[in-house]
Amino acid sequence: MKKLYSLIVSISLFSYAYAQPTWSEDIACIVYTHCSSCHNDVGIGPFNLMNYQDAFTHRYSMNNSISNRIMPPWPPDQDYREMAHANSLTDEEIALFEEWVNAGAPEGDPMLAPDPPVIETSMEITDPDVVFTTETFTVPSINDDLYKCFVIQTDWPEDRYVSALEIVPNNRNIVHHVLAYLNMTDDPVQDDLNDPAIGFECGGSLEGGDNVLFGEWVPGSRARFLPDGTGIRVPSGANIVIQVHYPEGTSGETDFLTFNMNFAEGNNIREVYQDQTLDHIDDIENGPLIILPFETKTFHEKYVLPETRTFLATAPHAHLICTRMWSFAITPAGDTINMVNIPNWDFDWQGFYDYPEPIILPAGTELHGYARYENTLDNPNNPSNPPAFVFLGENTTDEMMIFFYSYLFYEPGDENISIGGSGHMDHYGDCENVSTSIEDIEAENHIAFMPNPVDSDQLYIEWAEAPVGDYTFELMDVSGRTLLSTTCQSDCTIDLKGISNEGFYIGRIIQDGRLLKTEKVLIIR
């Protein structure tokens, strides 16, 4: 009787493992969580992903982008340094979506699907305390990049602390970047009056002097939300100078900016500072920032902290020739603290990335930044063919190397500041259990990859209960490229001699088209 019961349980688990994923029960919450915020009637996505039919229509292109980790865009490497609210898919979610497409993208029971999100605006700050809007501006006939400044005069009777900030260009397709500065003089107002056109021309960086960086927008930026009890101080009577970079080729296009702000409430608000802590002029160790034609070169920046700081967020910045940016700190005690790593730099997706918890670095800490530039034909983003000399500059075809950091001057208790949730974004609505079907399947089959990390040429696959029939083990790199595929029966030994590079890989077990296990495999031999 005991053996019969075990057989019945095994058959039941086997049948459960082969249940196909459906839109209603498995996929809708993934799409609504990670895709719909951009792919909607008012978003920047090129098509809508607001219901089953939308996803079914675009299932193949979605699967290609998802499996290659192009979408949803999340540049930071979470294994190097975890960032809050990562808009990225887990390995299980990627595998589940691919499985759904391969199964014919079934809808399932529509009654079991979550309601789609209601998205009526592209703004993230939907209830701002203050909204500023610039006049509609038409880019004149230009043969070069245009830098245009617009002035917002505040008339607040006292200093205010901004706890949430959002800059939104109306025509994002023609804007290279937006930088907002605080200025306590009348100079920008006078410059505006002296220029008969809307705003005034203001080429180059405005950083330094009377201007203090306040906010920014670059492709991929989102609204910034600061921790409770903190804010960016806007002095009473300050002018907000907004510099917009319109690249060559935008003549005749129109644009205006919306500037949303919320203010911190209460007394004793802590001031948040943000600046280009590492930059390509003062801090570069092997400059100047010049990349020769057909050259691949890595530059290094270093800055020593004069006081203890509590770091909240970071925003690396470069242009088109750059292919990777990363930063770390070395404390006076010799400890290395990873700060951020963008392994595949993409100019179109930039922004400030919050740490889940504050990083406190003592005075004397060395802050290091590195960036790799590939001025070759192998770089698909290279704007020049053949490659040309690339110099430091503000134009899109020039290059930059900046690591912006957002921080507080340290006070005891900063260790307890809550910045944001760690890891992946919370799932939309009641979809918290997305991808549990795969996790349950793994748990029920009790499949183990051993050892992991792998310090030899062999990986062992061990089943707690032998499977029925053959199965396939696949090893992929982190981009989704399959490096080896082996057919096995029951427990199996995988030969890894052909995998020469150390690092993270993804191991998968598939049987009859059904994914039974997916797990990161670290090779360290």
Image (spheres, grey):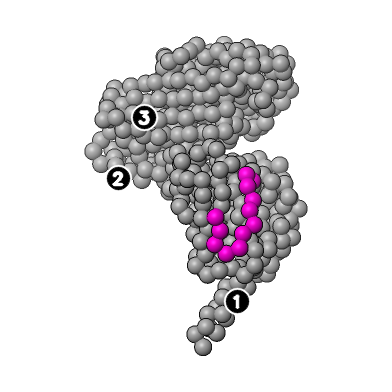
Kind of residue at badge 2: Asn
Q: Quadrant of residue 470?
A: bottom right
Which of the labelled discs sits on residue 416, or is there none? Answer: 2
Main secondary structure along the magenta-highlighted residues? strand
Q: Tell me what residue is drawn at x 51 percent, y 16 percent.
A: 205
Mark 2 vs 1, N-terminal side: 1
From this view, report whether residue 400 is shown above or below residue 508: above
Point out the stretch of residues depicted in magenta.
482-493
Lateral position of residue 305 relative to residue 1, left or right = left
Residue contact between numbered discs 2 and 1, judged by CB atoms under 8 Å: no
Q: How many marks?
A: 3
Depth order, front residue of 122/102: 102
From this view, report whether residue 274 is shown above or below residue 166: above
Visible residue check, residue 525: yes
Residue 212 rendering spot, x and y as whole percentages: 42, 22
Residue labelled with disc 1: 11
- Element class at badge 3: strand
Which of the labelled discs sits on residue 329, or is there none? Answer: 3
Foreground disc of the pair 3, 2: 3
Q: Quadrant of residue 380?
A: top right
Kind of residue at badge 3: Ala
Q: Tell me what residue is drawn at x 64 percent, y 57 percent.
A: 487
Distance from label 2 to label 1 (Cα)? 50 Å
